[in-house]
Image (cartoon, rainbow, N blue to C red):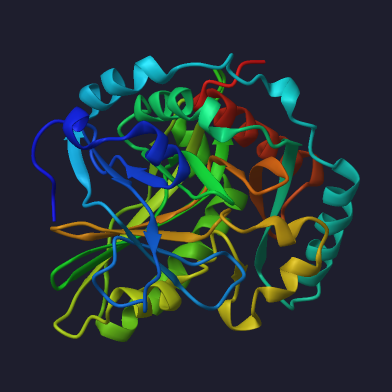
Amino acid sequence: MLSKGTMTEHFNWQEFCVSGAFLRASAQEVWIWSGAQRPSNAGEDENLYLLPFFESSVSAITFEKPPLKIPVFEAIRILEPFLGAQPLTSGHFQPPDRKNYDNSFQFIKGQVQRGEIDKAILVNFSKGPRLDPSKFLAGWMISVLKAAENFFPFGIWNSERGAIGATPEILFRKRGTELKTAALAGTMAKTLNLSPADLIKNPKEMHEHLLVVKDLAKQLGIFGKPTQSPTRVLELPMLYHLITELTVTSLELPGVLDIIKMLHPTAALGVAPRNYGYHWLRNLPEQELRYFHGAPLVFNLPAEQLGLVAIRHLEWNQDQFLIGSGSGIVDASELDQEWAETLLKRQSIFSQLGIKN
């Protein structure tokens, strides 16, 4: 149910800081949830669904108050009076651990070269002491709400943990009998001497991308032959990504809980082939920190169910702030290039959140 009226009539900032969520599903409008998060039996009518990356049980979340849907410009106007604390700087975060990354890279590369897997995603983390998120929330939210149209700004939190950012990746969009997903894999820095055509022509990046396309086509193929868009380049402020969209139409589509479990994790965030499993990744250094990173976060909207892949965000738990960034390791991957890709993604997250150097 959608609350009518203006944000000021229904919105309590202090309550929102304790327990809230938001989604910009289009460039013009933002959905906002607030109030206590009620326990749920994980039915099909909850507000949100979250599957932490390595967990097997979906958390269904219903907020005490009905959601608000308001223009982005109005949300920014209402948030501006709560810009209190001095913004965080990148100096609050320790650099990622290069030694851990190098060792894990070599481990995964060995698996690929032995033919055990085709690809796995390795994530590094920048960490900083947890401060009170409410002191920065208005600034972070305003910053991500201004992100380019090809991002989905989002956030979700309670008193224990949370995440806020702007992801370019969806897990699925379900509208009636139509189910859409997208393969987003294959990355290149956006620099003056490189163009989108260079990414399309890069065999390593295209191979990495097609592994994801193959995986998603197989999963959707349960319900019929999916249609597939031509692969194109998604242009972001600091990065180029390869993207291919896949769609299937069926009268027998499952409910949202089954779709989450059917698609997560794709080869863009987990392991290819899928049947090799991915839980072994958590045994590598720092990978157990992947709570939100790569997790499906699904919003139940009136006309659709929109599932995001939670990447390009800042998250926090009771101890620390975390910024994760990952890359896909395949046979042609080179250590320094993959490390540089993660650092560039990290920098893009700082930029989206207004975290200055």
Q: Nearer the viewer, residue 64 or 199?
A: 64
Judged left or right of residue 182, residue 275 is right
Q: Is residue 355 above or below residue 123?
A: above
Q: Is residue 168 above or below residue 207?
A: above
Judged left or right of residue 298, residue 97 is right
Q: Is residue 241 above or below residue 90?
A: below
Instruction: Write the residue at 59% across / 83% down.
Output: 275
Judged left or right of residue 107, residue 149 is left
Which residue reaches farthest left?
4
The x and y percentages for residue 58 are 46, 73
The x and y percentages for residue 62 are 33, 62
Instruction: Write the residue at 80% across / 46% down.
Output: 335
How many marks on residues? 0
Instruction: Write the residue at 51% across / 77% down.
Output: 57
Q: Is residue 234 visible?
A: yes
Judged left or right of residue 314, residue 154 is left
Instruction: Write the residue at 26% across / 44% down.
Output: 25
The x and y percentages for residue 97 are 84, 42
Q: Is residue 189 visible?
A: no
Quadrant placement of the N terminus: bottom left
Quadrant placement of the C terminus: top right
Q: Nearer the viewer, residue 101 or 337?
A: 101
The x and y percentages for residue 290 are 65, 57
